[in-house]
Image (cartoon, rainbow, N blue to C red):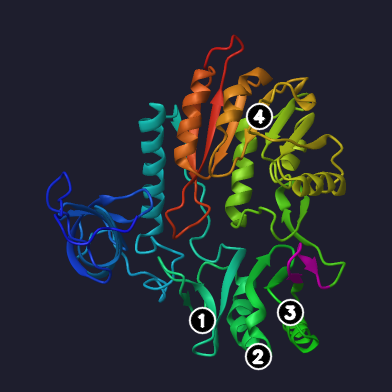
Amino acid sequence: MARKQGGLRFQPSGGQRTPAVPVGKKQLLDIARLAADGRGIAFADGRTWFVSGALAGEQVEARVLAAHGKVVDARTERVLRPAAMRRAAPCPYVDRCGGCNVQHLSHSDQLALKQRQLAEQLLRVAGTEPQAWASPLASPEFGYRRRARVAVRWDAKQQRLDVGFRAAASQNIVAIDHCLVLVQGLQQIFQELPGVLRQLSNPQAIGHVELFHGTAPAVLVRHTAPLGEADQALLRAFCARHEAQLWWQGASEPTADRPESELGYALAPWSLHLAYRPGDFVQVNEVVNQAMIQQALEWLAPQPGERILDLFCGLGNFALPIARQAGAVVGVEGVAGMVERAAGNAERNGLGNATFYQADLSQPLQDANWAAQGFSGVLLDPPRDGAFETTRHVSSLGARRIVYVSCNPATLARDTAELQRQGYRLKRAGVLDMFPQTAHVEAMALFEKGQDGQAM
């Protein structure tokens, strides 16, 4: 029904409507504390302001990016009263690129922020803290990232190809000359890529480009329309100069330009090589990944006669090192292709005691054939939404030890509460600094239950 014009205008029940905050407005703010995502929190004009680039105790001038009711998103334009912990951001693109949002903190202060986030979540949601805190597992703060997606977009109005990373709180693309967090083996490829893409006769066909580094560098070109022979030859020559594999992805699955190409990475401490394909989940930080596996092995302490269960096992990143020590390992994953590649990785590395199954891990576990014999220990490495359904039934598997690897402290805390109801006690926990220069927190926790079923 059309709205009737004229007549009485009624005020909302709360009184006068709060005027909207226009995008672009500048506001002087005193930052009270830090949010979980590393932004500063301020309170002004009856609103809560989340300010990127601001630290607790600072006074800043911020520019509004967006406003939703009484919540305002903003970014720091000027710091009028800096905090003692502030440092000059090492990256010249910090004010534009949306990738590294806490680099104005020293690495030690970043680790302290992540530790605090984890502790607060465990205490607030699960009402607990570990019997012992583990030291954070960290890598060098720069040059750690072995995988990156490069944004590409044809600007029809300007008749140019934009290549780079997404801007903060925007779909705009920031063109940058170098990225401090990429591993050295990808730096030159990244620097030369925009120039090569702009030489293409049909740059409009490029959707995005992904860069990988493991046992060899690789470039995946996502194209939305077929590329001509000349454009394909140009990209082949570019990859050949950098001794990088070239992969293509159109409407179907990624394919290697040369059939013998294989993406892979080494787990040198365990004399392992794992193969994967573009689209498979691979930890981006090699140093922290290996330290994380080593710590998981120490906490899980698998013995030669024990059966260990690895849930959300992926390519076998944990399962295969565990198989070097345990009597048998069962890996379970929801993605069929990953299960196939995990089994292939076990065979390639001569590990006959590791078997892999596909299963929906949101369903009860105890009725599965692979669960019938029970397990001495369980390792969980779920996605961000956690493993609540799994933790509800995990005690039926008979495991005394559970190592939980988390990429979201909120769901780890929620699942910790459930594991405690199952009779497990949180023995240890610690931060995994997989993404330095960001507020993203990963963690590992150890739970134990006594032989009588009571928490240890």
Locate residue 2, reporting x and y percent: 32, 58
- Residue numbers of the magenta segment: 247-257
Q: Is residue 47 left or right of residue 396?
A: left
Is 254 one of the magenta-colored residues? yes
Q: Residues within 10 Å of mark 3 (few under 14, many from 20)?
A: some
Give the distance between the C-alpha atoms of the residues marked 2 and 3, in whole angstroms. Answer: 15 Å
Give the distance between the C-alpha atoms of the residues marked 3 and 1, in whole angstroms. Answer: 19 Å
Select label 1 or label 2 by which is in front.
Answer: 2
Which circle's residue, 2 or 3, is located before the other in the chain?
2
**Which residue appears at 28% of the width and 61% of the height?**
54
**Which residue appears at 62% of the width and 24% of the height?**
394
Select label 2 or label 3 by which is in front.
Answer: 2
Q: Secondary structure at mark 4?
A: loop
Q: Which residue has dot 3 on it?
A: 239
Which circle's residue, 4 or 1, is located before the other in the chain?
1
Select label 4 or label 2 by which is in front.
Answer: 4
**Which residue appears at 59% of the width and 56% of the height?**
285
Please state which amino acid type lies under the numbered disc 3. Answer: Cys
**Residue 177 — which label?**
1
Which circle's residue, 4 or 2, is located before the other in the chain?
2
Q: Secondary structure at mark 2?
A: loop
Q: Secondary structure at mark 1?
A: loop
Q: Residues within 10 Å of mark 1 (few under 14, many from 20)?
A: few
**Residue 363 — which label?**
4
Please state which of residues 198 and 183 is positioned toward the viewer in this rendering: 198
Which circle's residue, 4 or 3, is located before the other in the chain?
3
Q: Is 90 drawn above or below residue 344 in the view shown?
A: below
Q: Secondary structure at mark 3?
A: helix
